[in-house]
Image (tube, coloured by chain):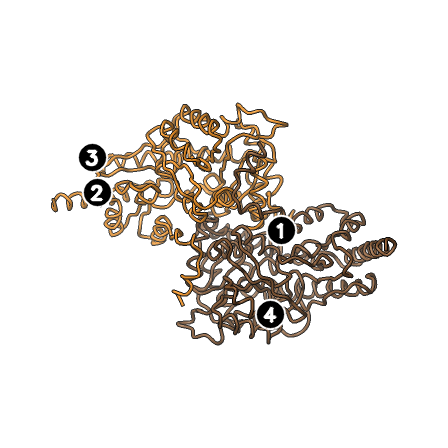
Chain colours: A brown, B orange
Amino acid sequence: METLWENRFAQRTQRMESSAIRELLKLTEQPDVISFAGGLPSPDVFPIEEFRVACNKVLKEKGEQALQYSVSEGYTPLRELIVEQSNASGMTIGIENLLIVTGSQQALDLLGKIFINPGDRILVEHPTYLGALQAWNAYNAEYIPIPMDHDGMVTDALMDAMRSGPKFIYALPNFQNPSGVTMSLERRKKLIEIADHYGVPIVEDDPYGRLRYEGDHLPSIFQIDSQFRNHEQGVYNGNVIYTSTFSKILSPGIRLAWVIAPPAVIRRMVQAKQGTDLHTSTLNQMIAYEVAKDGFLERHIPKIIETYGERRNIMLGALDSEFPAAVEWTSPEGGLFLWGTLPEHISAVEILEIAVKEKVAFVPGHSFFPGGGGHNTFRINFSNATPEMIRTGVSRLGKAIKKLIAQKEEND
Amino acid sequence: METLWENRFAQRTQRMESSAIRELLKLTEQPDVISFAGGLPSPDVFPIEEFRVACNKVLKEKGEQALQYSVSEGYTPLRELIVEQSNASGMTIGIENLLIVTGSQQALDLLGKIFINPGDRILVEHPTYLGALQAWNAYNAEYIPIPMDHDGMVTDALMDAMRSGPKFIYALPNFQNPSGVTMSLERRKKLIEIADHYGVPIVEDDPYGRLRYEGDHLPSIFQIDSQFRNHEQGVYNGNVIYTSTFSKILSPGIRLAWVIAPPAVIRRMVQAKQGTDLHTSTLNQMIAYEVAKDGFLERHIPKIIETYGERRNIMLGALDSEFPAAVEWTSPEGGLFLWGTLPEHISAVEILEIAVKEKVAFVPGHSFFPGGGGHNTFRINFSNATPEMIRTGVSRLGKAIKKLIAQKEEND
């Protein structure tokens, strides 16, 4: 029976695999493992009481609406709130530019659905976000990797890649998942210029933009592009598709994110969304609106920054004291992750095997490289573990690394 | 700029259109229009206070879990509850057979994603559910329509169709959307037999099965199939994929449904779901569990049946007195819809144009026929309007129909 079903599945499922991240998330569930593997926000900064109050209000005052079907575009007051806050942050968009989605994973899926013909090439940062690969593998995308350095995507490497006729460029410019690297202002401008020249759209994924712990905020690619476009009646019609989410600033459990794009793209995404999940939970949209209106995010985000900034610092300090000198890592200015590089001959998967026995977990980096490579890299999350867990976990991880390096030296 | 984007979209988007249903749902939003167009449950039977109490409890006792990411398979207690209730209703399944999805529209999308190669043929009832066509058009499915009569899909017409190598058979056996027709027990058995003989899976969509207003409950196709299979440790491994939803028995606004299928199918759907929306809202799953446990549905569903059953009777009575004799309609034993047939030379779209001016709406039937035809058919919903609105709306609609018939006679 199993084989029978395997033969029935569509060709595209051959590239669907339970991701490394997902399998490792399962380890997180064992209470004695300290996991730096997931990308989980800390429940310490969930506004639980605000959600409870909002939920009560919504169900008391608008219960019939909250439990009913609603339109695919999203709950209008929430859309208006996001438009207003986006414009206050320097964008120029209208409500026709905005779609509510069921988490930013759905944004990636819908973009794949409306843009990707089998074999279409997508330009991606190398490494890149695994969730995007999972979404677009289902549409049989091919990837052209663009190398990264400490200023993000190396735009000088773009020219050649552009001549291969890519469908779009995918960039995660702020505190990238997995690398923690931020794209410099100059590179953002260069990317827009090249994309515009070749007529290739940019998909900008910005889940962490507001979680900066040091340095100055940089305008998003969308915002820069938006500034040199003409806006008819305040509607954006440029070359960038932007997505962000409530997952890292309110709650991931409510599956709520949004896409900002030219109206032609939004209309097509709405049609795709109708066939995908009809609409995003009315109840969750109304609760999020109740929580987020009246400036709550302005008061709440600084608390998240304080908590995660402290954890980042503790993590960096612990790495300094516990990791052998042969290991390098990034010092991210924001976000949830930092990125490590082991000596060339050391495999991160081998480290993980030892680490799990020491009751600590992280994600080996190779899955983030669709073009191959990265076997000696790894991603570490610092938002979800408490300071004490970070110190203990890094100490265990340092021990695992030292153990493998020693083994390798013995074998030489 | 618009044309530029149009040229970029994937081929599959050529078959994505804003559906007739969706466009008509927009009419519903005008408060002076009486709409029989949507498939909305009545807010009169939403358990709003139960949701409010459950939401409070979940956020007070398990707020950190409710707002956090969770696994793609679904919230374990909710999965266990559905397994338990399914087994109590005569199925034999284990938790490996069950996946929580973000509304049954997502079940249809994920089935398309894992099964349909471009050009694959799907056997569908004729007429069939529009949401399934919307989901599968995105995977470039082709359809082989099987005619229906008052006993549902005409299984004698299946044999020829089976030799065309279909990927699966899609059936909505209980109070079908759009026709309101119920597949007879004999036909269910025949369908299972033929599907099994040819090795073609059945996808059974059962959103309304528990909403029966007259006649005896019939076992689902899944249940019948399940009864003649061997179950290793209580796990189902037959030929049917079953989906049902909380939309019609609790609330559609929470986007919560489930799929029951062999473990090989569930595993592949979980992988597809990871790339589609990662997981279904943790908060909504935990709230639904709180509401539904301890037998709430057993107490609540009879109230829905009472309300909708009364509305169905009022609708049938009003049709009898207000519609001209030349119009025919079904008398559904349950569900949300009935189905009308106009004289051959009368177009339901033309009726709708007049009806909208009379402030009443319904859905013309032709969109439900992927094989073409049905221009003189229409679907009417009776769950969402109050008895008074039903009487007024049917009177307006009768007037619109009589007006068009008179016009046609004049022109002859």
Task: Answer above or below: position of A277 versus B310.
Answer: below
Chain bearing tag 3 is B
Nearer the N terminus, badge 3 or badge 1? 1
Q: Label 4 amino acid?
A: Ala
The answer to which of A312 and A268 lies nearer the viewer is A268
Q: What secondary structure is found at the residue carrying circle 2? A: loop
Residue hosting label 4 = A157
Q: State which quadrant residue B132 falls in.
A: top left
Residue behind mark 3:
B325
**Is label 4 on the same chain as label 3?**
no
Q: Nearer the viewer, residue A145 or B9?
A: A145
Mark 3 in CB contact with mark 1 (< 8 angstroms): no
Q: Secondary structure at mark 3?
A: loop
Q: Is residue A137 above or below residue B189?
A: below
Q: Which mark is residue B69?
A: 1
Answer yes or no: is residue A25 visible.
yes
**Labels 4, 1: one chain:** no
Residue sitting at x 56%, y 47%: B273
Rendered location of residue A324, percent (x, y): 83, 62
In this rendering, the label closer to the viewer, 4 or 2: 4
Q: Amino acid at mark 2?
A: Ile
Chain letter for the residue marked with disc 4 in the picture: A
**Label 4 – label 1 distance at C-alpha:** 36 Å
The span from disc 1 to disc 2 (Cα, nearest Å) is 53 Å
Residue B312: give x, y in percent of width and height: 34, 35
Distance from the alpha carbon under mark 2 to that under mark 3 = 14 Å
- B238 relative to A412 in the view: left or right: left
Q: Chain of mark 1?
A: B
Q: Secondary structure at mark 1?
A: loop
In space, the residues marked 4 and 3 are separated at their CA atoms by 74 Å
Q: Amino acid at mark 3?
A: Ala
Q: Which residue is mark 2?
A: B346
